[in-house]
Amino acid sequence: MVKKKMVVAGRLWIEIDGMNFLGSGRIELLEKIEVFGSLRKAASSMGLSYRKAYYAIRAMNNLAPAPVVEFRQGGKGGGCATLTETGRQFVLKYQKLSHEFVIFLTKQTGAF
């Protein structure tokens, strides 16, 4: 009989009032917005449609105690999207929690 390796796996997401608020995909979107200053460019870099990215941000802004992204409509140069301080804090907290979650999962693998 061949011994197979068991691994404990999981995904981390944060809910507010039972609604999906943050997960790895949304965190990546927020990080890309911080880099590009544009929702369109952030979405494109992830292979997401602008519409899907916009609705994700809208959902986060509606669920969070304060907006995580602010939009400024543009004229000649176009608009921009920027993370608020609240958004930056959520990214940092999620990254820390995600790191701790990976450590937890790694330790559990030895239990089997």
Image (cartoon, rainbow, N blue to C red):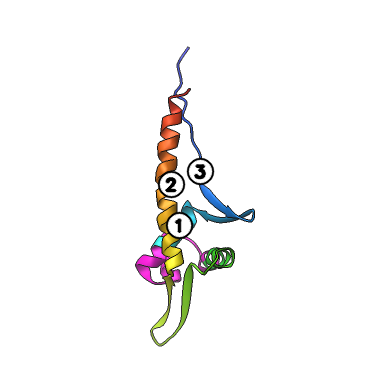
Residue at 49 percent of width and 58 percent of height:
26
- Is 25 drawn above or below residue 86 in the view shown? above
Give the numbered dot on residue 98: 2
100, above or below 81, in the image: above
Count of all numbered marks drawn on residues in the image: 3
Q: What residue is pinned by disc 1?
A: 27
Q: Nearer the viewer, residue 85 or 55?
A: 85
The answer to whether residue 45 is magenta is: yes
Identify the mark nearer the N-term, 1 or 2: 1
Mark 1 and mark 3: span between their CA atoms?
13 Å
Name the spot of residue 106 as percent of width and height, x first. Answer: 41, 33
Residue located at (43% from left, 25% from top): 110
> Looking at the picture, how far across and down is residue 42, in whole percent?
42, 65
Q: Label 1 crowding class (10 Å Cα cut-off): few <14, some 14-19, many 20+?
A: many
The range drawn in magenta is 32-53
Q: Amino acid at mark 3?
A: Arg
